[in-house]
Image (tube, helix red, strand yellow):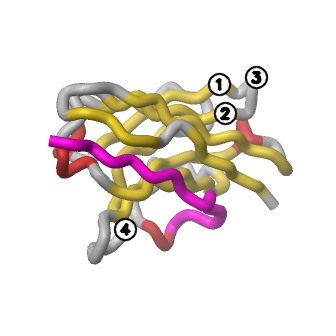
Amino acid sequence: QVQLVESGGGLAQTGGSLRLSCAASGRTFSSYDMGWFRQAAGKEREFVAGINWTGGRTTYVDSVKGRFTISRDNTKNTLYLQINSLKPEDTAVYYCAAAPWRGRLLLAVGEYDYWGQGTQVTVSS
């Protein structure tokens, strides 16, 4: 079992920045592939970014490339998402997720086994 708790969300202005954190507890964090997802009101949950267990491989959905950076600190059991150049369309609940490393980066909701409760990001125009 892995327990995940997100933090760092809030209200920000267009063009601003936020840093989301996801604190993990339970089984060995460093052996898990991690991802960030988001879900806007009335929409399906979508993949945002993923990172492998070492932190050496990352992937992003096209809409956030160049603005979002996913990273992890295995010594602190923490996953991060740096969000820059915020846009109103980034408004959503952001979730972190974990899955045992399977040899490739995971992009789908159904591929992750553990989820946090989410943190709200609201971007004002």
- Amino acid type, callout 1: Asp
Residue under numbered circle 3:
75
Which element carries disc 1, helix, strand or loop? strand
The answer to if 101 sits in the magenta stretch is no
Q: Residue 73 — which label?
A: 1
- Amino acid type, callout 3: Thr
Instruction: Report if the CB atoms under discs 3 and 1 are less than 8 Å apart.
Output: yes
Q: Residue at x 40, y 30 (%)?
A: 18
Residue lying at the far left in this picture: please name it. 125
The answer to if 124 sits in the magenta stretch is yes
Q: CA distance from mark 3 to mark 2?
A: 8 Å
Question: In this image, 12 relative to 14: left or right?
Answer: right
Instruction: Report if the CB atoms under discs 1 and 4 are less than 8 Å apart.
Output: no
Q: Residue 95: give x, y in percent of width and height.
A: 50, 55
Q: CA distance from mark 2 to mark 4?
A: 22 Å
Q: Residue at x 25, y 29 (%)?
A: 67
Q: CA distance from mark 1 to mark 4?
A: 25 Å
Q: CA distance from mark 3 to mark 1?
A: 5 Å
Work out whether mark 2 precedes mark 4 in sequence or the reverse, and give the earlier one: 4
- Amino acid type, callout 4: Arg
Instruction: Report if the CB atoms under discs 2 and 1 are less than 8 Å apart.
Output: yes
Instruction: Assess disc 3: are there few (<14), some (14-19) or many (≥20) residues with their C-alpha within 10 Å of its C-alpha.
Output: few
Which element carries disc 4, helix, strand or loop? loop
Q: Residue 90: give x, y in percent of width and height.
A: 26, 48
Question: In this image, 67 relative to 6: left or right?
Answer: left
Relative depth, front residue between 97 and 5: 5
Residue under numbered circle 2:
78
Q: CA distance from mark 4 to mark 3?
A: 29 Å
Q: Residue at x 59, y 41 (%)?
A: 7
